[in-house]
């Protein structure tokens, strides 16, 4: 029987990503990774794209990974794991291995939305039995907070810095979760470490579905977001409550919002505590602040309609 | 009994891969290699191999998937040419740095731009320093034999490095030739069972592949890699000896042709060696002491042995089917020059660039070079160190 999703039982389990790694204190990413791996009792093999998580967790001659783990390059966590999973299938078919093993790829938003999108798309289309987890901190953090296509509208980064001629990032985020859903794969979901039970349930569900699965998980980065070190969980909760980061899943084409805030908070609640949005509160940038709210409203509204539209018809 | 067949180079390599029967193959099309992966896919589709195919969306992913599959613990192949190899370049270094014995036929083709699908060595030369073993092949028979031997060399427990098997695009890959296939059973027992080393799939013993190693230890890893490379020639010879016992076909680190008593010599890779040997025979008949050296193990390059084999010559011409832009010499020339520099007695040397983008290498080009060699030996003067031949002015 699988470990019940209760804090009491889960806390008895061994961490698959041990402490002692060198991510910044208060970083959201290791929390996300721990939750993902704690959610399952199956043996797991992971691949990891280059980025903060990777460079900080396996440094000669130490590793924080208690499971078999492979880092290949920046853009190919999905292709790499597709190779591991295929070898597993080959050896299983030949009777050389009989264990049930699960496969998870971890990539940052840069390694997933941008440079690794082709590799991810290919692996998902080929139907490998694996979960790809994007820990989305909204920029290339490892190289020093450069803009990615996951960076939110208006954010200050080191490659779209706020200056006299530029108000921060002027483009909207790429909606990767929907792009993955458009691949027609059996399971796609968005999660947040603030809603840990929801996150773990999604991981569990994903493991029980055969084929390619994609999870997009928000992972606050206090360095890049210019926020307080102990705010990772609070900020990810506000991201959910403002509907900036809605929690939903798309299972075989049916969209389900897994958490609807009782009261949708204004986006400024999410932006205010983060230094990367400070400039948006200057009078000349009011239009951008407004636009950022409009984008969130538009996306949330579309998601609500999508849920209705895709709901199975009751006879 | 071995089977005598009339096949193309691609067909021969595909047949070797079928006989080896690897666990995983990543496939992506590119001319002139496509044919190999197409044939292999058809073996898989018809249950002729146990191989699981990964039909990737690019060569970058092909090599990435090979790295994952090989680290998982099993025998892994892919094949490529030209732009495909260029796209893989980043991951070639990771395959070798992680010490993964992937075997990859490389059907040599020119690089863009201008785009050109025909044979030259620019692709393989661009990957010569990435820590892979490279075996080069004159004809379909050699490509077939090298492919089979590559598995033994790459997977040797003292080596564990990826290996490329090169043959000339179209000239060899698409021409039909007479050759010998070994029996399936013989190939199977020659390559043996794959021995895993630190496989990812061993859940009981979790390993981490691809760590961050900075100034404190990176250099030691590089030195260790170089050390392993230095053991490759010994293993290549050992595998070649075993192969000779099985087939009667002799292989070494390189081939020499009428070189021992020669006064002038040509060094050339792959298919052009065949034409050159014919012309050398004609010159020998005229009383000119000419010979040839054709590298087989190009990476790691057996400097000492090559230098030793050439040092007695009066003049040497290195023919390069690739250039290294920037005012320096062709890549093969630079290695031969390095091999000879360490010798006390050195021949006069010059470098001729030929056959780029599949331009035919004809007997008159070999004659031209041999005449120049004779003249150089006689006068003791090199007219011009580097020139293009068979090209419009
Ligand atoms: C091909 C390639 N290009 C660029 C880099 C440099 N690089 C390493 S990590 C990184 C940023 C990673 O960003 P992301 O994927 O969002 O992960 P994060 O560091 O934010 O966790 C970059 C640009 C690289 N390693 N490889
Ligand atoms: S820079 Fe950000 S993402 Fe990277 S380790 Fe630090 S807090 Fe985490
Ligand atoms: Mg990031």
Image: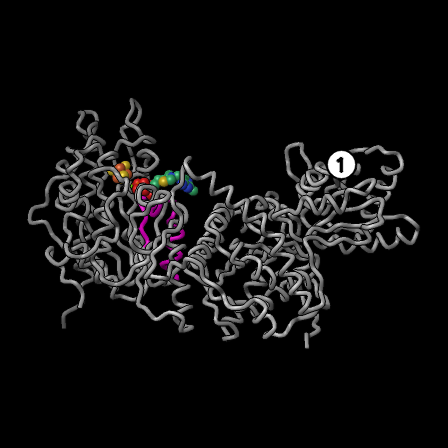
Q: Is residue A125 magenta?
A: yes
Query: Hey, which quadrant is residue B142 in on the image?
Result: bottom right
Which residues, given as a range, are shown in magenta? A105-126
Report the side of B15 relative to A290 (left or right).
Answer: right
Which image quadrant for residue A26? top left
* x and y percentages locating residue B108 in the rendered image: 63, 52
- Residue A304 within the segment the image draws in magenta: no
**Which residue is identified by label 1?**
B344
Secondary structure under tag 1 reads loop
Q: Is residue A138 above or below residue A72?
A: above
Q: Residue furthest bottom?
A: B1
Indicate which quadrant contains ligand 1.
Answer: top left
What residue lies at 22% left-to-right and 60% top-to-bottom?
A40
Image position, residue A162 (x, y; %): 28, 27
Q: Nearer the viewer, residue A143 or B114?
A: A143
Residue visible at 63% across and 63% down? B10
Q: Position of residue B349 (x, y in %)?
A: 77, 38
Who's the residue at 34% across and 50% down the image? A48
């Amino acid at each position: 029987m699988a470990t019940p999703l209760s804090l009491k039982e889960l806390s008895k389990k061994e961490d698959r990503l041990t402490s002692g790694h060198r991510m910044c204190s208060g970083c959201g990413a290791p929390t996300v990774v721990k939750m993902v791996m704690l959610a399952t009792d199956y043996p797991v093999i992971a691949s990891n794209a280059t980025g903060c998580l990777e460079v900080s967790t396996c440094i000669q001659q130490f590793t924080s990974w208690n499971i078999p783990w492979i880092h290949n390059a920046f853009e190919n966590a999905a292709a790499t794991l597709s190779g591991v999973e295929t070898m597993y299938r080959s050896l299983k078919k030949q009777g050389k291995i009989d264990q049930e093993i699960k496969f998870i790829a971890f990539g940052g938003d840069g390694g997933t939305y941008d440079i690794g999108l082709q590799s991810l798309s290919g692996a998902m289309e080929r139907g490998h039995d694996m979960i790809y987890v994007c820990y989305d901190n909204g920029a290339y953090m490892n190289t020093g907070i450069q803009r990615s296509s996951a960076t939110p509208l208006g954010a200050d980064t080191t490659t779209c810095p706020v200056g006299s001629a530029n108000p921060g990032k002027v483009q909207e985020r790429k909606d990767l979760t929907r792009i993955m859903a458009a691949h027609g794969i059996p399971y796609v979901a968005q999660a947040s470490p603030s809603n840990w039970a929801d996150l773990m349930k999604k991981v569990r569900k994903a493991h029980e579905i055969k084929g390619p699965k994609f999870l997009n998980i928000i992972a606050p980065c206090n360095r890049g977001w210019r926020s307080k070190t102990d705010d990772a969980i609070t900020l990810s909760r506000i991201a959910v409550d403002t509907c900036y980061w809605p929690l939903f899943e798309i299972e075989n084409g049916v969209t389900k919002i897994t958490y609807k805030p009782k009261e949708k908070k204004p986006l400024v609640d999410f932006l205010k505590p983060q230094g990367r949005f400070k400039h948006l509160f200057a009078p000349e940038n009011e239009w951008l602040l407004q636009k950022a709210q409009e984008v969130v409203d538009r996306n949330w509204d579309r998601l609500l309609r999508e849920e209705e539209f895709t709901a199975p018809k009751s006879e | 009994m071995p089977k005598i067949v009339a096949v193309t180079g691609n067909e021969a390599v595909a047949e070797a891969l079928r006989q080896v029967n690897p666990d995983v193959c990543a496939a992506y099309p590119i001319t002139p290699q496509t044919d190999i992966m197409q044939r292999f896919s058809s073996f898989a589709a018809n249950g002729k191999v146990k191989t699981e195919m990964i039909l990737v969306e690019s060569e970058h992913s092909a090599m990435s998937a090979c790295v994952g599959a090989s680290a998982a613990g099993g025998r892994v192949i892919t094949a490529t040419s030209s732009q495909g190899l260029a796209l893989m370049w980043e991951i070639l270094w990771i395959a070798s740095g992680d010490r993964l014995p992937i075997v990859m036929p490389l059907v040599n083709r020119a690089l863009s731009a201008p785009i050109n699908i025909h044979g030259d060595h620019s692709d393989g030369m661009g990957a010569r320093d990435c820590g892979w073993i490279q075996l080069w092949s004159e004809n379909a028979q050699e490509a077939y034999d090298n492919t089979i031997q590559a598995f033994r060399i790459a997977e040797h427990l003292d080596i564990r490095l990826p290996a490329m098997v090169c043959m000339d695009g179209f000239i060899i890959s698409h021409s039909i030739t007479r050759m010998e296939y070994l029996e399936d059973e013989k190939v199977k027992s020659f390559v043996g069972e794959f021995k895993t080393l630190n496989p990812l799939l061993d859940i009981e013993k979790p390993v981490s592949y691809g760590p961050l190693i900075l100034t404190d230890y990176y250099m030691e890893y590089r030195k260790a890699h170089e050390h392993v490379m230095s053991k490759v020639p010994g293993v290549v010879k050992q595998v070649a000896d075993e192969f000779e016992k099985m087939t009667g076909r002799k292989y070494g680190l390189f081939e020499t042709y009428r070189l021992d008593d020669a006064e002038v010599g040509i060094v050339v890779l792959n298919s052009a060696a065949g034409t050159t040997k014919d012309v050398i025979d004609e010159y020998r008949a005229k009383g000119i002491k000419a010979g040839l050296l054709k590298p087989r193990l190009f990476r790691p390059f057996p400097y000492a042995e090559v230098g030793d084999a050439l040092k007695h010559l009066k003049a040497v011409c290195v023919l390069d089917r690739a250039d290294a832009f920037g005012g320096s010499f062709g890549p093969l020339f630079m290695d031969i020059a390095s091999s000879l520099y360490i010798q006390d007695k050195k021949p006069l040397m010059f470098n001729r660039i030929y056959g780029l983008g599949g331009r035919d290498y004809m007997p008159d080009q070999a004659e031209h070079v041999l005449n120049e060699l004779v003249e150089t030996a006689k006068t003791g003067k090199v007219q011009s160190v580097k020139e293009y031949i068979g090209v419009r002015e």
